[in-house]
Amino acid sequence: MSKLNFQNNRVMQDRRSVCVFLPNDDTLNIIINVKALCQELLEQVCDLLHLRDCHLFGLSVIQNNEHVYMELSQKLYKYCPKEWKKEASKGIDQFGPPMIIHFRVQYYVENGRLISDRTARYYYYCHLRKQVLHSQCMQREEAYFLLAAFALQADLGNFKRNKHYGKYFEPEAYFPSWVIKKRGKDYILKHIPNIHRDQFALTVSEAHLMYIKEAARLDDVAVHYYKLYKDKKEMEASLMLGLTLRGIQIFQSSDDEKQLLYDFPWTNVGKLVFVGKKFEILPDGLPSARKLIYYTGCSVRSRHLLQLLSNSHRLYMNLQPVLRQVRKLEEHEEKKQYRESYISDTLDQDMDQLEKRSRASGSSAGSVKHKRLSRHSTASHSSSHTSGIEADTKHRDIGPEDSFSGTSLHRKLKTCSSMTSNSSSHTSGAESAGKDRLEDDSQEDEIEMLVDDPKDLDLPLDISPDLCIYITEDMLVSQQLNGHSDGLQKTKDFYRPAQFKSG
């Protein structure tokens, strides 16, 4: 194609380069129309990654050191730098600097079995791995050793004495820097092999499940943090909003330290109100005079926070009945494994006695050979040789490796065609197992979000014995779900989500 013809080709001139960073540090280089919807880009990413279930993930751009998640119904150029939008392609392979976008977890869950697609679960696991490296739960030091063991089992497989010795992994890839500084690399390399060995026979999928479950118990891992201002005149934000698995937290922030001021589970939050830059929290059961008032800095951030909070709350509400049944099934499976372990121990004792009697009687049959039943303790995955690192053994349940069969309940993303893409890998070391601005609103509308108790949604749900559940788009944005009405209802001057009502 001649240069003249190319410059006259409107379709090619409207195309831009996008670099999408993935949770496993791979990147996708995609050429896309500058006026494309964010939904189209997400579909393209999911197609390239072969993701069937991506409802927990979103696309984000970094603004003021915060991840701002894109509204999928918006056009891509709403979030791009002005230079990127104006930069026209100069040729088939001559695009300007790419726009940097992150494909990452937008909604957290406490149990990996709620992620139906194993590829999606892998990327969820990779996201948590990064979060754990920045975790600061000083009172839960033993948890980081257990998490490292799960990750090593997922990345390297079963511990092999002739292969996994010395510096067979990089501590920096598995531990927060403060743990390494406190204990030292030699201490970690000495004691981790024993804990890694204790995870013998865990499959990659099971190791991912255990890692997700244990990481969710750390207070600062499955959390989104956003800056807040005490008043309109404050120049530097001194507060931090934490969106957790179960609600909202408010921190006093100074340098790199955060002091918890308020912790509001969703059950204790009556209403959230956004009026322009103002953000109000009304605790449930208290008079309006007791409300907390903060500021977001701009109405665009208010809108973003509202969307993230409302969707997270809605997902939390809809998953509570599911989680209760999943826990029951996991408890049942744990009891079953305990009984199998008990029977195996009894059988071992009987065979040992038989072997002793055989040797004593001089039987020509010789010693009795037997194969011990394969089992994995559900009581604890911590090593007995950790020399002072006491692993938490309260919730070390392991279910069977789940298989995902049956009819998919979620909407499949459409294939996005006629787009070119390239993938480049940046993974190294033991982590090789992975296979694979906004326009400001001039109006200051009041935005309200009513928060309800999840007990109001306690409905029986059908869950298959393999403990899998599909998180659907309906759980985040639908108007009707399981007989409950939900969604943003627009009135004259404000948005108000409808309360959940019994169907």
Image (spheres, rainbow, N blue to C red):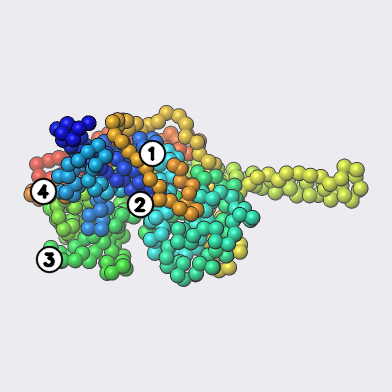
Determine whether label 2 and label 1 are within 8 Å by CB: no
Tell me where residue 425 appears, x and y as whole percent: 40, 47
Query: Which residue in the rendered view is the most extreme toward the front?
Result: 2
Q: Which mark is residue 49?
A: 1
Label 2: which residue?
Answer: 245
Q: Which mark is residue 441?
A: 4
Quadrant assignment, res 482: top left
Label 3: which residue?
Answer: 233
Which of the two labelled residues, at mark 1 and mark 3, occupies the earlier sequence position? Answer: 1
The residue at the point 42 percent across, 63 percent down is 176
Front tag of 2 and 1: 1
Q: Residues within 10 Å of mark 1 (few under 14, many from 20)?
A: some
Which of the two labelled residues, at mark 3 and mark 2, occupies the earlier sequence position? Answer: 3
Q: Is residue 443 left or right of residue 377?
A: left
Q: Residues within 10 Å of mark 4 (few under 14, many from 20)?
A: few
Which of the two labelled residues, at mark 4 and mark 3, occupies the earlier sequence position? Answer: 3
Closer-to-camera residue (121/503): 121
Front tag of 3 and 2: 3
Tell me where residue 96 appears, x and y as whole percent: 22, 46
Q: Amino acid at mark 1?
A: Leu
